[in-house]
Image (cartoon, grey):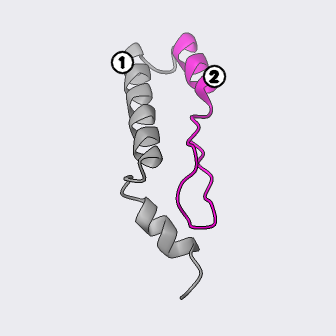
Amino acid sequence: MRATLNANWTPGVPEIIDADELDAALHSGEITPEQYALAWVTARDVAGQMARNTHPLLESVRSFVSPLS
C-alpha cells in the first residue's frame, strides 16, 4: 500500500502495490486461497480507510511528520 501525503498531511489516493507478488504466492502454493482472499479484503479495507482519512494510524503519521507549530 502506498499513499502520498500532501502539504496538509492528508493522504492522497491510495494505491495497492505488489498485487503481482500476492498472485505469485497463491499460484506457487506459498499461501492458501483463503489467505489470498483475506489479504485482498484487508488491502481494500485499508485503502478505503486511507481514502476516507479514517485509518487509525494516520494521526500517528501526522504527529510524526508534521512540522512543530
In the image, which is nearer the foreground, mark 1 or mark 2?
Answer: 2
Asked which secondary structure carries label 1, the reply is helix
Q: Residue at x 44, y 60 (%)?
A: 58
Question: Residue 20, percent across and down?
Answer: 63, 22
Q: Residue at x 53, y 74 (%)?
A: 64
Placement of 6 over or under 20, stated as above or below? below
Q: Quadrant of the N terminus?
A: top right
Q: Amino acid at mark 2?
A: Asp
List the residue tagged with mark 1. 34
Placement of 22 over or under 28, stated as above or below? below
Q: Nearer the viewer, residue 55 or 53?
A: 53
Asked which secondary structure carries label 2, the reply is helix
Question: Residue 15, percent across and down?
Answer: 59, 38
Q: Are marks 1 and 2 in contact (CB under 8 Å)?
A: no
Q: Residue at x 53, y 88 (%)?
A: 69
Q: CA distance from mark 1 to mark 2?
A: 17 Å
Residue 14: image quadrant is: top right
Question: Residue 49, percent across and down?
Answer: 40, 45
List the residue tagged with mark 2. 20
Q: Which mark is residue 3?
A: none
Seen as rendered, the residue at the extreme front is 8
Q: Amino acid at mark 1?
A: Glu
- Which residues make up the magenta segment? 1-28
* Residue 2 belongs to the span the image colors magenta: yes
Q: Nearer the viewer, residue 6 or 42?
A: 6
Placement of 66 over or under 18, stated as above or below? below
Question: Residue 66, percent across and down?
Answer: 56, 75
